[in-house]
Amino acid sequence: MVCVGTACLAACAGTGISQALADTSGTLLTTSSATDTNRLTNLRMASDYRKNAKACKIGIRPQTGRRNRRFSMQRLLIVLAVLLLGALPAQATDFKWQDQAGKTHSLAEYRGKAVVLHLWASWCPPCRSEMPELADWLKKHPNVTFIPVSLDSRSQDAVDFLQQQHISLPVLVSDESQAYGVGARGLPTTVAVDASGKIRHLWLGVQDWQSPAWNQELLSDLR
């Protein structure tokens, strides 16, 4: 799991990762069906990896003959692996987390009610920078069912951060396998889930919680 933002992109500079993250940061995935979701996600991720592959090839002496064919086949296998692993699920009801008392919950408990699932971590700089604006947004939208889930390995780290920032949010924790299960590939990730448990939108990266256009997009999926 990676975090998405200026600080993390800077840390990835020169590794071949920064271009892929820059291309996907802030990307909106719109789903009308499971097939459309997978197609859109796969095309996007394939495009990102092709761009990254081209960027990595700059300054590298062109290869010919058998070696070039082998290189092309290796790149094709990488893209195919990404397509298989990157499909965004249509349903999110299997997602699970634990509260501070250690009790396990799942999105299946919220069937019949639209929710916003927000994945973050105290060790993620973009998540930390986004949190105050997100907290203000929640005060203005008290009727929204909002589930903030931290991927901190120690729940106390999330508690300490929220207390330091004077932010009142429940500390709910999960792990990377659960995050991958709802299509998250970085942090922060915000997911709009409709009343049937279907993922309507997934946003990767820091969002402008004060933007009227983005708010309209998010809230329209919760009706």
Image (cartoon, rainbow, N blue to C red):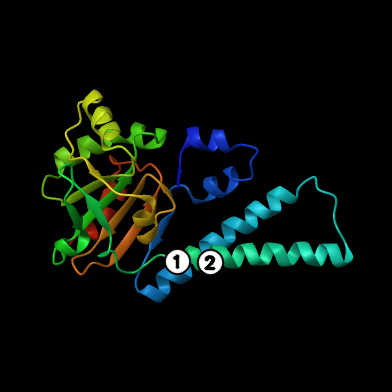
Disc number placed over residue 79 in the picture, else none? none
Specify the farthest residue to the front: 102
Q: Nearer the viewer, residue 218 or 168?
A: 168
The residue pinned by badge 2 equals 83
Side of 38 where 66 appears, left or right: right
Residue 11 at what x, y percent from top left? 55, 34
Residue type highlighted by circle 1: Ala
Determine which residue is flagged by label 1: 87
Q: Position of residue 37 (x, y in %)?
A: 41, 69
Residue 62 image offset from top left, x and y in percent: 85, 55
- Outermost left residue: 143
Q: Quadrant of residue 187?
A: top left
| Label 1 SS | loop
Q: Are marks 2 and 1 in contact (CB under 8 Å)?
A: yes
Report the Cα–Cα distance between label 2 and label 1.
7 Å
Which quadrant, please, contains the C terminus? bottom left
| Residue 59 quadrant | top right
